[in-house]
Amino acid sequence: MHISEGVLTPQVWVGGYVVAAGLAAFSLKKMRTDELPKVSVITAIFFVASLIHVPLGPTSVHLLLLGLVGVVLGTSAFISIMVGLTLHALLFQHGGITPLGANACMMGIPALIAYGIFNLRKNFSMKYGEAIFGAIAGAVAIFLAGICLALLLALSGDEFVGVAKVAVLAHIPVMIIEGAVTGFAASFLTKVKPEILDGRALDASGY
Amino acid sequence: MHPDIDKYAHLESPVHRWDPRVKIFCMFVLILTIASLYKLPFIALSLSLSVVLLLLSHLPLSFVTKRLIPVSLFLLPFFVIIPLTMPGGGGVKVLMFSWNAQGLLIAARVYLKAISIVMLIVIMMGTASFADSLKAMERLKVPSMVVQMILFTYRYVFVFLMEIRRMNKAMAARNFVKKTNLHTVRTIGNFVGVLLVRSFEKAEHIYQAMLSRGYDGVLRTFFDYKIVTWDYIKAAMMVSFCILLLIGDKFMWFVL
């Protein structure tokens, strides 16, 4: 779901870079050096997520894990996604260099919002809080990313409005799968290694 | 899908010999220039420059064409969707949509720009080892934290690809078949969870081992870059080409 090279007009990709640079600076500023391995691990998982396919009727969709990145990393999620997208562009030629800022906004902002949604679970004391809020966070992240994608395309010219509509529709099945996977992953982590979800770096005493 | 970007980094060519810092800088300027073009003839001109650079770089053609597939998959549908959905279509009707031939022109513009830029990215990254390119990025003032993140992520990707293959094999050995049902989704959720927990612990160990050997976030290498006159000449040629492209694109109103 990366926007590829050539599509966005200069106004849109420059705007994307400006917004992304601000958010990346904020994200980097809040990140501590000892969080580096953790953030890099999640970035690598985000990078390979597209290799994990889930069958869906006759076709299959691949994971994006935007919600999970947000849930685990908090504010560092933005820089993580931006670095992951940079590597996608440089190594696999998915997405690209010019739309990098726009792509980072499209996936990074939903990840930050997913973190906010997941944090709401603390206000409710329910049995499967992590699973439920994880699932909502995962699904909402994809939904928002789809909307952002449509918006960026539509901003680039009237001729892309049709493409934008197709893109939003294509995100609905991904949203459902992604929500379910994020929910199960969050509940698994709660049981096995809850400190990952606390939003702090692991330390040597963790194991 | 394997990031084998280093495969042809050892070749000998004018592009390989170009100082990585200057090369990356110039490629960026060229990429951003191409992304700002509007007129088809100038886009075609930039594409021909990309092809010339590709020939100069001695990279095998298949190395590049393989990497044009993802962008093609994303953009080829545009040739159908844009003419059908673009407002102002006349005459010809296809089902309930009107076919606007102008849309083909727009799709071609987008596609040629994309191909040209993707080729440049492959040339930029394929003509130096990834470590070299990273070092050059650090010299070009990319924040050290970001460079380190890229470095670690790049390393972990290979580890995780192996881990995923191993876990898939283990699941297959236990007769797991992916289907469209809750069980599959739950299993994949747990799969991601296990991958996370394992990789966290591994990464933490690696990082502590690095810290105990004195790692402080600075990339140190035994060699340093040296810019020679030729680097500047190549850069000057590229930048003037960019300026000409931009001027032509902006002021040659009689061109399509």
Image (cartoon, helix red, strand yellow):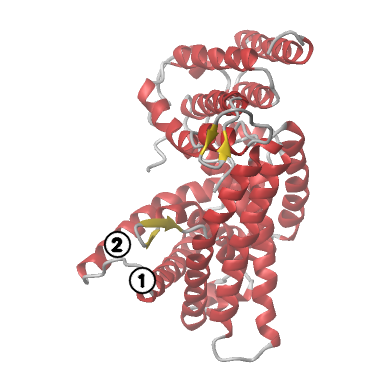
Q: Is residue B251 above or below residue B134?
A: above
Q: Is residue A196 visible?
A: yes
Residue depicted at x 53% and y 72%: A204
Residue depicted at x 61% and y 70%: A137
Task: Answer with the quarter of the image where residue A138 lies.
Answer: bottom right
Q: Position of residue B76 (x, y in %)?
A: 48, 33
Q: Is residue B221 left or right of residue B37?
A: left
Nearer the N terminus, badge 2 or badge 1?
Answer: 2
Q: Position of residue B145 (x, y in %)?
A: 65, 49
Question: On what subunit does the disc labeled 2 rest?
Answer: B
Q: CA distance from mark 2 to mark 1?
A: 13 Å
Residue depicted at x 70% and y 43%: A154
Q: Position of residue B22 (x, y in %)?
A: 63, 21
Q: Which element carries disc 2, helix, strand or loop?
A: helix
Tell me the residue that label 2 is attached to. Answer: B168
Residue depicted at x 36% and y 71%: B184
Q: Amino acid at mark 1?
A: Thr
Tell me the residue that label 1 is attached to. Answer: B184
Label disc, if present, on residue A195 of the rendered structure: none
The crowd level at tag 1 (other Cα within 10 Å; few <14, some 14-19, many 20+) is some
Question: On what subunit does the disc labeled 1 rest?
Answer: B
Q: Amino acid at mark 2?
A: Asn
Q: Nearer the viewer, residue B238 or A7?
A: A7
